[in-house]
């Protein structure tokens, strides 16, 4: 079973400490949501997991094989049409052209894009369609681990609902693990199995919340209720600035600096 | 447009001034306000320079000026904007301009030979000796090239197969190749020949340059191969524009030129120094050498006509564009048909 | 059959539309010719023959078989020099674009190379290479290399970091990064540079040939200049200009339009 373990993650930009002693575990099939105010380092953490950034210090072990990213902006290659954008990862893996085309068509269908849309360039697609292409691109390589950086934040509710369904479908069918960043607590409650709360200066974990209800059985009412409960938690309130108070910097375990942490 | 306006305006003002000035009682023709002479930095200009310095033209004009032209564009500019009254130039250039409707007339032919083959090897004396050699020739398809090719053919050689001709853009480039020992032989015209020989024998060039010698006198070859005089009518003086109409002026200039020409032949050292004073590129010794190696002949345009037509005919056959497409008519020589 | 015809019809339609849009360009060229004719009347045939006389001379040069061989020779030299400059310049420029150090170090060198008049190189080139093809080719290379280099370097440096991250995140192999990410972005910087380089290359070839070779358009120009044959000189110039215009508007511009289909606004 694939797992990701991170301990003692420190990252500095110059003298500013962006992440301090961050740790998390992620198991196959699990959806983990990172929430927190801006500047708490959740994007940095995601970039480190994606391999886009080298942290100052970390003990990390990951057995996930295929990792796919969906960024906040669609980030499509403007000179490729939608089909080529979707199959970018496949091309990198050496999948032949005919197979790539078949995949593009099936993914487009899943995402609600027409065959004509596949031939269009990004500037000819609406923002919502571009987001769908971006998600399709990530799903095309059938990843073990899906990293999502607030991908739905700019979309309307109807589209959000559609894409939530796609995501859940993917997780259900392929057992993909998901590490997602969101500033929308309700989205986290809707989609995640566990929620981790982070606060800035320095970026660190302060609270973990496990959602008991299995995904399939989460009704809208339950989602609203649970979100309200979560909003009452002290750490959450202080972290989002809704209440006064300080959250102390705790060390992740009792020992002082040591090497070779047994993950 | 501006030139037309300017000319009209200056003519109008001139006419007005003349009308207002009291006319002097002149026995001879009135003195011109200025007389402009022009020439290239070669042997043909030396008499003009002497005329300028000796004051021989003082009675003819108040101010006498000499302008140097060193490329065809400058020459063309001189001929058009009434930039000069009398200009020295190669004969084929004169014919070319005449055929292209520039108002001019040939006055005389004073340079009857200036082409030499210069070589590192002092043994080579005739064209046939150069068989199988590589020769630098400046000015492709121009007069030196044509004369050389023609003489080679007359001598029974095939210039394309029996020599390797390296064309260079200018005589300076040919000289450089010689000095750098890239080539052993070059076709040059006076005074470049004298300049090359003097330069390579004097410090500092003599340190690196090889010994150079005059090999073949192409004028002599011309005489030998065509059974005629050892001279080629190559350059002379031309009268331009309005000055043509003034027959007395033309005659006086011709006489003055002939006299200066004689003086140059008689006093080569003094003439050389004179030339070096006006022409930067020349040294006095080289200029003197160039005079000493000149065939001492002089002819007016009318006298030179038969030989000149023969020469122009040769150029016409090989490169019609270099003489303007046809032989010039009688008016070119100042004769009436 | 129709499946084949459809893209052909589309291409044909696009070409015709493009050519039709050339009326504006034709009009401005004709205006220039009118000014030229006027200048010719004022200055006379020896200094400035008019466009009609020049074109007549040019067509007689073509008929007599004089013009085409020289044009081919000059075109060959331009092609070699330009090809080398564009190839090496683009490659080195891309590499410089990736490294900040290389970019910083090469900027003053590029300014130097761009500022040096090609004629200075010509003298050296003639000493090194003599009077063959190599002198003009070398001079063209020196003149056009910095243009291609600067364009490619700018292109390499300005690639959106976000797209670079996508390439990294999806583990694109380096060859794919080059062909699918860098090159398409860079072509939008390259094309203007290449068009500039094309114009420069012809100018430099003719100048180099004028001074150092015995064949090619420049050498023929030198001969006609010495023979005071202004009509032929202008004829050669018109021939070269015509070739340049044809290359740019019939070859480069359509390629540029096709390659830049993905842009929102069509380029200039």
Image (cartoon, helix red, strand yellow):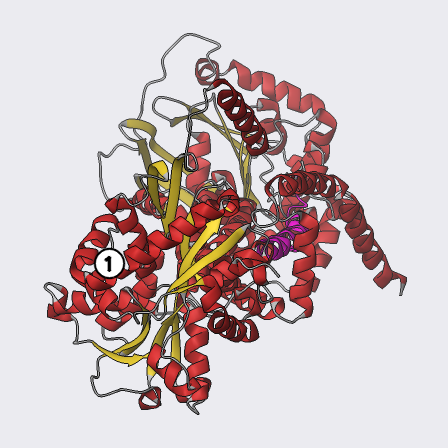
Q: Could you say where residue A236 lies in the image, as x and y percent from the top left? A: 48, 18
In the image shown, does B297 or A201 lie closer to the viewer?
B297
Residue B212 seen in the current view: yes
In the image shown, does C155 or B15 lie closer to the viewer?
B15
In the image shown, does A103 or A123 lie closer to the viewer?
A123
Question: Is residue C24 a member of the stretch shown in magenta?
Answer: no
Image quarter of residue B265: bottom left
Name the element at disc 1: helix
Secondary structure mainly formed by the magenta segment: helix
**A124 to C99, vertically: above or below:** above
Residue drawn at x 66%, y 71% as measured from the top left: C64
Residue drawn at x 70%, y 38% as measured from the top left: C31
Q: Could you say where residue A246 lies in the image, as x and y percent from the top left? A: 36, 13
Q: Residue furthest top?
A: A244
**Magenta segment range?**
C234-263
**A112 to B203, vertically: above or below:** above
Q: Could you say where residue B292 lies in the image, as x and y percent from the top left? A: 22, 68
Residue C83 seen in the current view: no
Image quarter of residue B138: bottom left
Chain under label 1?
Answer: B
Q: Quadrant of the N terminus of chain B?
A: top right
Residue, disc 1: B263
**B241 to C6, vertically: above or below:** above
Q: Could you say where residue B69 lies in the image, as x and y percent from the top left? A: 38, 50
């Amino acid at each position: 079973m694939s797992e990701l373990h991170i301990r003692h993650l420190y990252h500095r930009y110059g003298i500013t400490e962006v992440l301090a002693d961050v740790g998390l575990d992620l198991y196959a099939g699990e959806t983990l949501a990172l929430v927190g105010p801006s500047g708490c380092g959740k994007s940095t953490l995601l970039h480190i997991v994606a391999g886009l950034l080298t942290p100052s210090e970390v003990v990390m072990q990951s057995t996930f094989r295929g990792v796919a990213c969906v960024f906040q902006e669609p980030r499509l290659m403007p000179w490729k049409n939608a089909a080529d954008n979707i199959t970018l990862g496949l091309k990198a893996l050496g999948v032949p052209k005919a197979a790539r085309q078949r995949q593009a068509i099936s993914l487009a269908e899943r995402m609600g894009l027409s065959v004509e849309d596949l031939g269009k360039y990004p500037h000819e697609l609406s923002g919502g369609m571009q987001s769908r292409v971006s998600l399709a691109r990530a799903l095309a390589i059938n990843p073990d681990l899906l990293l999502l950086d607030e991908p739905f934040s700019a979309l309307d509710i109807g589209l959000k609902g559609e894409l939530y369904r796609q995501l859940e479908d993917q997780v259900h069918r392929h057992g993909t693990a998901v590490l997602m960043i969101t500033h929308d607590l309700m989205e986290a409650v809707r989609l995640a199995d566990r929620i981790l709360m982070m606060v800035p200066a320095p970026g660190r974990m302060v609270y973990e919340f496990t959602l008991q209800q299995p995904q399939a059985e989460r009704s809208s009412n339950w989602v609203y209720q649970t979100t309200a409960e979560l909003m009452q938690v002290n750490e959450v309130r202080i972290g989002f600035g809704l209440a006064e108070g300080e959250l102390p910097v705790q060390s992740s375990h009792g020992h002082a600096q040591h090497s070779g942490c047994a993950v | 447009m501006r030139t037309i306006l300017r000319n009209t305006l200056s003519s109008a003002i001139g006419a007005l001034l003349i009308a207002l000035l009291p006319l002097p009682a002149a026995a001879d023709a009135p003195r011109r306000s200025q007389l402009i002479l022009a020439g290239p930095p070669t042997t043909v200009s030396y008499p003009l320079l002497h005329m300028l310095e000796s004051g021989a033209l003082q009675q003819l004009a108040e101010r006498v000026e000499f302008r140097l032209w060193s490329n065809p564009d400058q020459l063309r500019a001189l001929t058009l904007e009434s930039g000069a009254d009398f200009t020295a130039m190669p004969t084929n250039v004169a014919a070319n301009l005449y055929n292209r409707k520039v108002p001019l007339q040939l006055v005389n032919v004073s340079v009857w030979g200036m082409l030499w083959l210069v070589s590192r090897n002092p043994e080579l004396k005739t064209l046939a000796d150069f068989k199988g050699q590589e020769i630098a020739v400046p000015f492709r398809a121009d007069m030196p090239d044509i004369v050389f090719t023609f003489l080679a053919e007359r001598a029974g050689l095939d210039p394309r197969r029996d020599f390797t001709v390296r064309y260079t853009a200018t005589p300076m480039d040919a000289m450089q190749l010689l000095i750098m020992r890239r080539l052993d032989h070059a076709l040059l015209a006076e005074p470049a020949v004298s300049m090359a020989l003097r330069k390579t024998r004097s410090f500092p060039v003599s340190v690196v340059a090889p010994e150079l010698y005059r090999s073949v006198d192409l004028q002599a070859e011309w005489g030998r191969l065509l059974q005629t005089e050892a001279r080629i009518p190559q350059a002379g003086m031309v009268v331009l524009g309005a000055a043509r109409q003034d027959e007395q002026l033309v005659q006086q200039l011709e006489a003055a030129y002939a006299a200066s020409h004689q003086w140059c032949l008689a006093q080569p050292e003094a003439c050389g120094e004179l030339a070096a004073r006006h022409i930067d590129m020349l040294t006095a010794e080289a200029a003197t050498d160039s005079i000493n190696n000149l065939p001492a002949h002089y002819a007016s345009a009318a006298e030179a006509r038969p030989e000149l037509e023969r020469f122009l005919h040769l150029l016409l056959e090989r490169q019609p564009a270099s003489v303007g497409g046809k032989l010039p008519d009688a008016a070119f020589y100042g004769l009436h048909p | 059959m129709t499946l084949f015809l459809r893209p052909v019809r589309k291409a044909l339609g696009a070409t015709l539309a493009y050519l039709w849009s050339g009326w504006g360009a034709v009009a401005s060229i004709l205006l220039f010719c009118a000014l030229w004719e006027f200048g010719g009347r004022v200055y006379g045939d020896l200094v400035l023959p008019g466009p009609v006389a020049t074109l007549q001379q040019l067509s007689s040069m073509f008929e007599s078989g004089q013009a085409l061989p020289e044009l081919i020779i000059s075109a060959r030299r331009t092609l070699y020099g330009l090809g080398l400059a564009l190839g090496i310049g683009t490659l080195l420029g891309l590499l410089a674009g990736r490294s900040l150090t290389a970019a910083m170090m090469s900027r003053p060198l590029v300014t130097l190379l761009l500022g040096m008049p090609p004629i200075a190189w010509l003298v050296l080139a003639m000493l090194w290479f003599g009077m063959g093809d190599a002198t003009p080719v070398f001079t063209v290379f020196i003149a056009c290399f910095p243009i291609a280099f600067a364009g490619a370097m700018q292109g390499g440096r300005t690639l959106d970091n976000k797209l670079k991250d996508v390439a990294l995140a999806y583990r694109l192999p380096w060859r794919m990064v080059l062909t699918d990410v860098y090159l398409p972005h860079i072509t939008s910087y390259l094309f203007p540079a290449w068009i500039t380089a094309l114009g420069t290359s012809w100018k430099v070839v003719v100048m180099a040939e004028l001074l150092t070779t015995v064949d090619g358009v420049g050498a023929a120009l030198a001969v006609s200049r010495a023979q005071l044959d202004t009509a032929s000189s202008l004829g050669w110039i018109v021939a070269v200009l015509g070739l340049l215009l044809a290359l740019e508007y019939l070859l480069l511009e359509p390629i540029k339009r096709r390659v830049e289909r993905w842009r929102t606004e069509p380029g200039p």
